[in-house]
């Protein structure tokens, strides 16, 4: 987690944020002047590794087991009590419902006992607003939100104002990394493993399809890429009897480069669309979510921003993947905008799109839009 400058006296409000939507039990306290007063992230990677992905029941059980202790340690780290907080925020969706229930019920109980408001936070808004915790980034900005469950280009014009310009029509970017890692036997979670392998590989050895590149709009597609990776791996095995270390590294490098090519193509279109929306002025180009922890992809997007005379902003690597500070910060932004906020009647929402007017691209089920 990013270093906290504890030399300044933090300014109120202070908000406690709890994140339990997937496989990280996390909590943090942030202050209005962008200090992280305490933070804890407990990863469940080892609990899910043998299954090659997150098992919802195991995740919920681990959150129940660890959240209380994690919160006690967090408050000790900060030297503060729940009574010192000005608001208690928790991820209320989207995510795995069992985990969401643990975080939301705990946060509501703390809020009720300490007489502080409960603040319901959309996990994606948490990712989207994290840059503002780290540096002065004002609205409007163009956001590429890339995580395990999402891949979207969004126009962000306020803390609660998101317009989806593009989205994946099938797999999310992180999902593509995770599936590639799984089929190459690299384990879980795939993103960092594929990135490490790719650094050893030669991307130009293989040519992979670039779904959606050149198409109008700025939607993404990654499921074809995953199938192409599988075929490549099978071809290598057919030729050589095994998948050698260099095959694996070269496939990862080619895969990562192709994801980068797709992102750059789609972002170029997103920039043009956003320019039309906000006039000809400049705006920050922001990338957030777990996949934004990929240094190669960050580098390419930063270069794109420079070429378009746009300021590039991204959270530090440890604030890209799920954490409590992003939820505390989004909660703080909501509390600041509405000091009378009271979300105690909000229930966990497994699906909760940022842009509620956008048509669902994936998961058009009864429960509403997934992406
Ligand atoms: O934001 P996040 O922690 O959780 C969700 O909200 O989904 O994102 C997790 C995703 C996983 O798919 C993981 O493989 C991916 O982010 N990820 C990465 C990297 N680190 C995490 N993908 C590519 N390169 C990385 N270094
Ligand atoms: Zn996330």
Image (tube, rainbow, N blue to C red):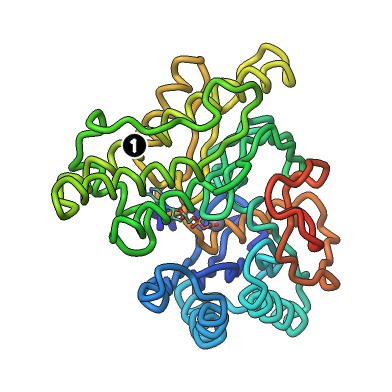
Judge left or right: residue 79 versus residue 270. Answer: left
Q: Is residue 226 above or below residue 164?
A: below
Q: Which residue is mark 1?
A: 296
Q: Is residue 134 visible?
A: no
In the displayed image of the protein, which residue is found farthest to the front?
A: 238
Judge left or right: residue 252 versus residue 95. Answer: left
Element marked by disc 1 = helix
Residue drawn at point x = 63 percent, y = 65 percent: 95
- Does the Cβ of the disc 1 residue fall within 8 Å of ligand 1? no
- Front-lying residue, 167 or 328: 167
Q: Which picture quadrant has residue 157?
A: top right
Whereabouts is ligand 2, in terms of quadrant? bottom right
Residue drawn at point x = 54 percent, y = 20 percent: 214
Residue drawn at point x = 60 percent, y = 41 percent: 168
Q: Is residue 185 above or below residue 288?
A: below
Q: Which picture quadrant has residue 91?
A: bottom right
Q: Is residue 64 visible?
A: yes
In the displayed image of the protein, which residue is found farthest to the bottom?
A: 65
Residue 204 rendering spot, x and y as whole percentages: 25, 28
Judge left or right: residue 28 versus residue 332. Answer: left
- Front-lying residue, 278 or 235: 235
In the displayed image of the protein, which residue is found farthest to the top?
A: 280
Quarter occupied by the N terminus? bottom left
Residue 239 rendering spot, x and y as whole percentages: 17, 45
Residue 49 rendering spot, x and y as whole percentages: 37, 72
Residue drawn at point x = 46 percent, y = 80 percent: 73
- Front-lying residue, 18 or 76: 18
Residue 94 rendering spot, x and y as whole percentages: 67, 61
Label 1 Cα crowd, 10 Å radius (few <14 / some 14-19 / many 20+): some
User: How many marks overall?
Assistant: 1
Q: Is residue 215 above or below residue 148?
A: above
């Amino acid at each position: 987690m990013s270093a906290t400058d504890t030399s300044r006296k933090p300014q109120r409000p202070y908000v406690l944020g709890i994140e339990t939507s997937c496989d990280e039990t996390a909590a943090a306290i942030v202050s209005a002047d962008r200090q992280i007063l305490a933070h804890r992230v407990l990863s469940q990677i080892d609990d899910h590794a043998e299954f090659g992905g997150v098992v919802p029941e195991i995740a919920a059980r681990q959150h129940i087991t660890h959240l209380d202790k994690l919160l006690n340690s967090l408050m000790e780290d900060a030297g503060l009590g729940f009574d010192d907080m000005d608001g208690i925020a928790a991820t209320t969706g989207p995510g795995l419902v069992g985990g969401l229930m643990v975080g939301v019920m705990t946060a509501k109980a703390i809020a009720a006992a300490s007489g502080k408001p409960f603040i319901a936070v959309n996990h994606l808004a948490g990712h989207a607003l994290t840059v503002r915790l780290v540096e002065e980034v004002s609205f409007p900005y163009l956001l590429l939100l890339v995580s395990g469950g999402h891949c979207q280009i969004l126009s962000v014009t306020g803390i609660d104002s998101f317009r989806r310009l593009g989205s994946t029509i099938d797999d999310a970017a992180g999902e593509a990394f995770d599936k590639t890692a799984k089929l190459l036997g690299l384990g879980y979670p795939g993103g960092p493993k594929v990135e490490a392998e790719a650094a050893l590989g030669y991307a130009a050895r293989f040519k992979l399809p670039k779904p959606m590149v050149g198409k109008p709009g700025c939607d993404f597609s990654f499921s074809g890429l995953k199938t192409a990776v599988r075929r490549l791996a099978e071809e290598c095995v057919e030729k050589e009897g095994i998948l050698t270390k260099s095959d694996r590294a070269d496939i990862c490098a080619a895969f990562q480069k192709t994801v980068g090519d797709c992102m750059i193509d789609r972002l170029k279109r997103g920039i043009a669309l956003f320019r039309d929306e906000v006039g000809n002025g400049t705006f920050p180009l922001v990338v957030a979510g777990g996949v934004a922890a990929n240094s190669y992809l960050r580098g390419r997007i930063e270069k794109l921003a420079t070429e378009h005379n746009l300021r590039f902003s991204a959270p530090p690597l440890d604030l890209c993947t799920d954490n409590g500070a992003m939820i505390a910060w989004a909660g703080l932004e909501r509390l600041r905008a509405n000091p009378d906020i009271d979300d105690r009647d909000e229930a966990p929402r497994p699906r909760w799109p940022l842009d509620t007017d956008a048509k669902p691209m994936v998961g058009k089920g009864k429960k509403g839009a997934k992406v």
